[in-house]
Image: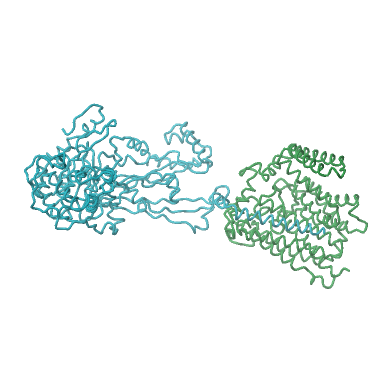
Amino acid sequence: MAKSSVAAIDWITVLLFLLLVGFGWGNIYSASYEGEAFSLSDFSQAYVKQAYWILFSLVIIIITQAVEAKFYERFAGLIYVISICSLLGLFIFGKTVSGATSWYALGSFRLQPSEFAKVCTALALAKFLSDMQTNIRFIGHQLKAFLIIALPALLIIPQPDPGSALVYAAFFFPLYREGLAAGYLIVGVSAAALFILTLLFNPLWVVLGIAAMMMLILIKNRKQKPKYSRYFLVIIVITGFCFSVNYIFNNVFEQRHRDRFNIVLGKEVDAKGIGYNINQSQIAIGSGGWTGKGWKEGTQTKGGFVPEQHTDYIFSTVGEEWGFLGATLVVILFVMLLIRLIHLAERQKTQFSRVYGYSVIGILFIHFAINIGMVTGIIPTIGIPLPFFSYGGSGLWGFTILLFIFIKLDANRVNEW
Amino acid sequence: MRKLLLYLIIVTTGIVFVARLFYLQIYNTSFASLSEDNAIKIIYDYPQRGAIYDRNGRLLVTNQPSYDVMVIPRELKPFDTLEFCSILNITKDKLTQRLHKARVYSPRVPSIIIPQLTKDEYAYLQEKMRKFDGFYIQKRSLRDYQTVLAANVLGYIGEVNEALIQKDPYYLSGDLIGIDGVEKQYEKELRGIKGVKRIQKDRFNRDIGPYKNGRFDTLPVNGKDLTITIDRSLQAYGQKLMENKRGGIVALEPATGEILALVTAPTYKPELLVGRKRSPNFTKLYYDTIAKPLFDRGVKGEYPPGSPFKTINALIGLQEGVIDLKESIYCRMGYYYGKKGQKLGCHSHRTPLNMIPGIANSCNAYFATVYRRIIEKYDTPQEGIDTWGKHVESFGLGNYLGNDLPEGKRGKVPTAEYYNRIYQYPTYKWYATATLSNAIGQGEVLTTPIQLANMTAAIANRGYYYTPHIIKAIDGSPIENEYYTNPKITTIDKEHFDPVVQGMHEVYTKGTASFLQVKDIEICGKTGTAENFVKIDGVKTQLTDHSVFIAFAPKDDPKIALAVFVENGYWGARYAGRIASLMIEKYLKGVITRTDLEEWVFMHSLEGEYAKQYSGKPFKINQ
């Protein structure tokens, strides 16, 4: 082990991690306690379990720091294979909890391998991109990278857990940082915009509107001899996309998925049925005001009006009990953590560390963005946890390992040259 | 720079979230009340409404429990409708219909399914109640009248209306509030303060304990008991005397201003306006626009006072020094004035008379002379009228008395401005003679019976009065309201009262009411016969005169002062005088010695008289 890597640990990141975990536990306690006396031996309580998982994550942190930094790079491939096998194994040995076969059960203890698969994928992608042979500008290498990312995602979708699979979009961050063409981004964003427009309006109107816009551009540019065939091709693709989105949305999606979109797009108001969660969550956050109702004083939280409040909807407890100030603080803590991590990633001397760092940033960012976006009603319901905050052992450990491997890699930069 | 875009994405997301939080938590304020609706159930604990006692401590109004069967539609579970209906004795159709109505009103808010069960029904149902989820029994408190009297004084309670709920946040839909009389005036004392319990609910609407450990809960404060100034037996007697007549009696205690009796006729029994019966009965009473039983004639009936008003003109004449006690004035069956020889008629009596017999014989010519001198003492009639008016108003006439009854009327004392307007001054001039009917209490002067009784009390007190009031004590401790305990002084000096009192005494001993004397009681009174008119099919038609009487007794230590109005009762002593003297005897002696007199009043009805103007045929008056 290198001489001064412990001293080189980035304590700012560690501090932010501890703040988030600590504040998270306080809110889990509030959301899950029901007036009973506090006792660390009462394992039926979510907050007690979470306390032990936090304690155990400290052990995990020590292990991640004790392991030689080179280990992660060297064994990235093997780790990835093991992870893929664990996902495959779910199809045979998996335990079904509330509809999703995402768990291995050992007695009352359950483990969710998809939470760890993210780490493994990040390591594998970092290993692949940092290979001397790899050039991300080659289509072939791009395909290989996509395959590394898509394989676990494809295994997670049929659990079914499409939310967790969506997280793999996070790997756009390192790919983009390592030089993936911006065209992918443009196409991706345009597709998302078209998707939403098509849902909001009739696809025919969307196509006509875009065609009209293109006509204007064409007329404006007519003296520069525009390539008419290219304009024509674009409009054909857009037409095809819009109508297939419409078709898929109406015929392939299930009703519950359609509802989720319709509620966020304001096309449907249903406070009792499918919209209940998001409506109650907004009531909880909205009733917090500036400073909130105080810890353990949230009426929405106490009454259990927000289902899954200590897991995916934990942020609504923050909003209700700590108000605008508390909720904003959490947002700021996450933004600070992410910016700090970009800073760390940029100072890495090896490409492996940097790619891994950006993978961590991407994964944390996408959880943060989707979770808080969902809880505050900006985006449709996608059930993924808020890192370090939400209740759940596998999730906490997954994020801890994810983050602290990077801290180890970063601390080890003093030994690189 | 590629990493710049990533920074941008992260920071933008953060800003979007903070903006969204700002919108949800600060900008949009509707969520706070939504979360309260969600999670806090408020239960009110209604205190007992205060009881009402008469001046002698006899109970008039108390409470009776009443039980409503309530339903919360969304908590209903399938139940044995047959059993339910047979217990409550309603048809299944009716039940279905009411449940539907409740559900339409609100699935979460309780609605009344069957109001006001009897005690027996309640006892029986209570045992079975556990079988019927979603139903519960709510105890309410209704008024229980221990008397059939004084509905106009006591008033009644009913559910608050929407406008009041908006105005006063204390009241909630379905709460009861005093609507009239003492119930309205002393609502705050009687109602007490309801207690509030806040219960925290979970998302299944189950109670999970007191909200914030009951920090915001309050206990109910019971309503206060009121003692009112009414004398129950005098009130009862007055109401009995006024049966089959229309009008009012107001009796006061001159030494305090306490209202001993406040009778209006026709009236109704207070129990008619309790609970389930209130609505149909109220409608019936309300639409009786001929007899107007809801109209309290004692405080709202504005009548010309007639001759009793002469006592005031006598006092003003003495105060202004325009007449002395010795001067006699001729009366030739009336008072002649003006170039054309207009006449203010009078009845036959010996002549000439000075003041004391002038009052006793109610000589119109005497008072026309006095009145004219008062007005003409001043350079202009305007000045004269306003000086005269100030004296009159010092007796509490022409404006609200400021008493503690929620209703009242100003009456009317004409002013110079008023005459200027109707005579179109200064285009045309007017003189004292144009207002001459004020001399005898006809014409422009209007008074309510309570004002007239108060005026009588001021004479009885020789120059001051206490504002009449109905409240005597709250929760046993006498009122200490300076408005009622400080005397109001009239503008007439004390020494001028004795001759007027003497004149009123002679009304009984020698004058217009001499046949009404009561043994051992020195009564002072004044008869009145007030002309009155109505419009029938647009034609001004005179009706039989109102019978008016004011009196106080005993002469030197007045215990009671009263005014009696009997609509269309003809001359003053005929109805009002009889009733007044019986009231005085009843109050001072407790027993009636002149049973023949009493019998006469009981037997005589004026219903025939009242029917005349609606008969559609020509009719004769003053028969």
Instruction: Kindly give the residue lying farthest to the front in the view shown.
Output: B427
**x and y percentages locating residue A337 in the rendered image:** 73, 62
Give the position of the C terminus of chain B as an image quadrant.
Answer: top left
User: Chain B appears in which tint?
Assistant: cyan
Q: Which colouring convention does the figure follow? A: by chain
**x and y percentages locating residue B319 in the rendered image:** 16, 55
Q: Quadrant of residue A324?
A: bottom right
Q: Residue B9 vs residue B537: left or right?
A: right
In the displayed structure, would residue B171 be above or below residue B611? below
Q: Nearer the viewer, residue B434 or B105?
A: B434
* Count of marks overlaid on the render: 0
User: Chain A appears in which tint?
Assistant: green
Q: Quadrant of residue B497?
A: bottom left
Q: Nearer the viewer, residue B186 or A14?
A: B186
**x and y percentages locating residue A285 in the rendered image:** 62, 54
Q: Nearer the viewer, residue A178 or B313?
A: B313
